[in-house]
Amino acid sequence: MFLTISTTGDEQNPATDLGFLLHKHPDNPFSTKLSYGTAHVFYPEASAERCTAALLLEVDPVALVRRGKGKGRGGAPDAALAQYVNDRPYAASSLLSVAMSAVFKSALNGVCRARPERAQTAMPLRIEVPALPARGGAELVRKLFGPLGWTRVDAVAVPLDEQFPEWGDSRYVRLVLEGELRLADALRQLYVLLPVLDDAKHYWVAPDEVDKLLRAGEGWLAAHPEQKLITSRYLARRRGLTLQAMQQLELVRLAESDDLDVESIDNAVDETTDTEEKPVPLAEQRRAAILDALRAAGASRVLDLGCGQGQLVQAMLKDAAFTEIVGVDVSVRALTIASRRLKPERMGERQAARVTLRQGSLTYTDKRLKGYDAAVLSEVVEHLDLPRLPALEYAVFGSARPRTVLVTTPNVEYNVRWETLPAGHVRHGDHRFEWTRAEFRAWAREVAQRHGYGVGFVPVGPDDPEVGPPTQMAVFTMTAADDAAKPRGGETAERNGDRTEKEANAA
Ligand code: SAH
């Protein structure tokens, strides 16, 4: 198994800095024994202009088989020849990835005391793996490395036998990557993608594999179009672990993309209304409408889903009628701000016991959200991509199933009344869509029907005769038959629910 990493440089930034970054000196060949063989690092070339480091892994197939035997099989002798005579010693694979993590540990972490600035900056890199087992072939190799910032991703199938081209291609490709990347990023990609391509991970997949994947995937995996394939193969197709990893990655993606300035445009617009008194900001009017609806429903244990910076939670705390308040948001940053606002450390014990802030994504079911009187989704649905909405629908209406659900969202028709909003623009950069009244109602009615709720609509803010109110609110109430212990209504709802759950898991 063989992999080379090359870079170019000049007098000022000599290519031989690669030695510092990899923590392996170009003049001193390095070898270390691993449990399944020996890893060598050496430099076929090392000048200021060009420097190449080679990682060679000599696998001892006997040690490999013995090692795999350790657990569980009761040591029964298994003489299958294939265990000893196979491609493991020659092909780049998960073993190479394990070796990389052993010999290039600091480089993978982007740590370099001698050249800290070079470790943090992109450099010209060329990586070559002459024999990479690739289930899915050259095409998959291109799909995996293509979106990762390389200017050249060259994957050529290796013929089974060069002398007999008519025999066709082997399952190996020769891989060449070229581009300007941080060395640590390049190594992390390889660390994950070599075993993904090999798809024959030989070692035990432990739950901490998820953490390893997330750490190595930092900065590139959350947005990768092949994220699902990568995650599933890396975790040896263990479904539970794959879902866990993908959920974490979704949190990362949302946290990276979110923008919490939700109230700014509402407030900016409110300032332009010319009334005598100081106008009440729309966000405040929304909270008042929500509190009214919650009180009317007699709710005391309330979920604030997508609680953002915690303004509604704070308002609810002021009313003793709300005995238990749980704020959930995907964004750690929002929750930190919410927690600062609420100052739980200054609350008395009983007050503090009333409120919980929790990180989570609303597109996944969560048992802890079951059994509440009411859930509020204030200005949240429009932050989800439309295809993710069924997953949220199932998590809230199918799984958590509070008696009352309040959903507020902008009424896009009203946008023409807002002078500060250019025509055709949504109110907030992170809004994935904004609905007309008819669209919102159609969605809400379908949701209600699918899950055994009734639904009514309440305008929030000035209800314009032509374009309606700036904010629209749907009040869902579980229908009596459903209110009993039974988790869900008729057969149709059952089937719909199931389908949505599958979608949620598949997405
Ligand atoms: N409810 C607050 C905040 C609305 S902004 C208010 O009315 O002011 C939308 C919030 O939804 C953001 O804080 C965002 O982080 C959160 N959010 C978006 N998608 C989410 C998801 N899938 N799971 C949980 N929270 C999400």
Image: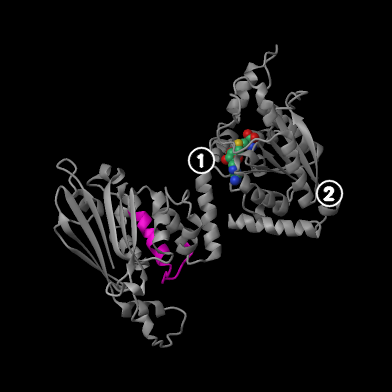
The image shows residue 309 at horizontal and vertical percentages of: 59, 35
Which of discs 1 and 2 lies nearer the camera? The answer is 1
Q: Decide if residue 296 is on the left or right side of residue 311.
A: right
> In the image, 156: left or right of 232?
left
Kind of residue at badge 1: Ser
Residue 346 visible at all? no
**Residue that label 2 marks:** 479
What residue lies at 83% left-to-right and 55% top-to-bottom? 484
Q: What amino acid is labelled 2 in the image?
A: Thr
Q: Which residues are magenta?
A: 187-208
Q: Which residue is mark 1?
A: 257
Q: Which is more toward the observer, 350 or 22?
A: 22
Q: Is mark 2 within 8 Å of ligand 1?
A: no
- Residue closest to the eye, 434 or 151: 151
Given residues 323 and 305, the one toward you in this image is: 305
Q: Is residue 250 above or below residue 40?
A: above
